[in-house]
Amino acid sequence: MDVRAEEVTAILKNELAGFQAQMEMVNVGTVLQVGDGIARVYGLSGAMAGELLEFPGGVMGMVFNLEEDSVGVILLGPDEQIEEGAQVRTTGRIAETKVGPEVFGRVMTPLGEPLDGKGPIAATKTRNLEIKAPGVMARQPVRQPLATGLKVIDSMFPIGRGQRELIIGDRQIGKTALAIDTIINQKNEGVKCIYVAIGQKLSTVRRIAATLEEFGALEYTCIVAASASDPAAVQYIAPYAGCTIGEDVRDDGGHALIVYDDLSKHAVAYREVSLLLRRPPGREAFPGDIFNLHSRLLERAARMSAELGGGSLTALPVIETQEGDFSAYIPTNIISITDGQIYVEPDLFYSGIRPAVNVGLSVSRVGSAAQTKMMKKVAGRLKLDLASYRDYAAFAQFASDLDAQTKAILARGDRMMQLLIQDQYAPMHVVDIVIAIFAGTRGYLDDIAVDDIRKVAEEIVAYVHENAKDLVARMDQVRDLTDADIDELGKTIDAYKAGRQG
């Protein structure tokens, strides 16, 4: 082949014209120690707190401790392929996860990797796991209700959009069920949901995903899973990843609900990595910043001001107690951070009262500010009446002779407790809850046998829907009850009872 010198020169000139000298500065360190899900790395003088590092085999780590001559790193994957002396590279990226509409309907790891077998998550937008919580001036008061569909909660412990309401109780007595029912109830409410599973079995996560899909709730829900088999570091970052996804919805002017299930395991995971990296232990061996760990997470729940879009992020953290120990370290920490708690009691659960919410120890510090006017009118005294009923019931166990007033209080209380029982995965519309509570608090169920209360209440709700359609439509639209509406509702229930007796 005959190639002339001019052609070679032209080709070389063309190649040289497109050449750009680029020098990439990479901070490289050396592994000093590795094991138990942590590593100590020497030589990363430019590493940032929370920065992602790349280890051999593609394993990622996150900078946790910045020390004088080394960096403490928590590993987000297996450490079998990492050896002492191995090279570690900085990435220049603070720990982040995928956000956006594409993550909803999916089950994913805290770093955005799919766990549901549906292929890669197509989201292109990412956000840092940790950012500063909105300040006071960026927020507005919590006034808009976030309906759970649960009679016992919506009537007495209302949750508002932007609130932080703790769900607390012993294991296996319905805490997660409360959260899942609340997610299912957001189906037509325009609220995106994030469920963060921390330290649970993958089989449990799959069952929850299947339940949400069965009830049509998975399409607006993102499940962030850090299972019991994952490293403690992954369990530690999981709630921050879920919060970041919710904040993306909130900052776009939307409404999001996030469930942290549960923060007890999160605290244990944080304690593990902290002690391995020689952070000094304090009470119950937790490091001194354990309060800050959860406060900086939960403070990110907020209802933003109108100038910032008016979006909201509502948090439902879950805490597991040991033998009902309400005053342990982590429970009292989170109670002091949140805006109220729903206490799930074992004795109620095992006696068949489900949801097993203890009326005396549960509270919502936002309260009626986040409750519809019609619910206030029918359920105003319900919490006080049920709390006094529990006191009377405890006293009645030791009394042989009771006066008529005490008997009436106990009879009404027995019926109201039955009325508040609700099947799992069966959240109710707010209008139906108001009708049922109205029937109970106004005495329409006082002459009904206790065992028939739930059946009769369902029949009353159906009867009102059938025979007072205009009233139901007005209640749904206005979310209030006038005196005329109350009279009409009472007459409709009277008509039902007359037909039932006839």
Image (tube, grey):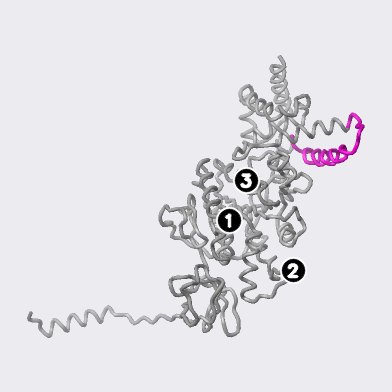
Instruction: Name the residue that disc number 2 marks.
Output: 283
On whether residue 390 falls in the magenta region, the answer is yes
Could you tell which of marks 2 and 1 lies nearer the N-terminus? 1
Q: Who's the residue at 72% across and 52% down the image?
A: 340
On whether residue 255 falls in the magenta region, the answer is no
Q: How busy is the neighbourhood of tag 1: few (under 14 within 10 Å), some, or many (20 plus)?
A: some
Q: Who's the residue at 57% across and 74% down the image?
A: 49
Q: How busy is the neighbourhood of tag 3: few (under 14 within 10 Å), some, or many (20 plus)?
A: some
Q: What is the quadrant of residue 137 in the picture?
A: bottom right
> Is 501 left or right of 94, judged from the image as shown?
right
Name the residue type under label 3.
Ala
Q: Who's the residue at 59% across and 55% down the image?
A: 307
Instruction: Name the residue that disc number 3 marks.
Output: 177
Instruction: Name the residue that disc number 1 marks.
Output: 200
Could you tell which of marks 1 and 3 lies nearer the N-terminus? 3
Q: Count numbered badges in the picture.
A: 3
Alpha carbon distance from label 1 to label 3: 15 Å
Could you tell which of marks 3 and 2 lies nearer the N-terminus? 3
Range covered by the magenta-colored residues? 377-405
Name the residue type under label 2.
Arg
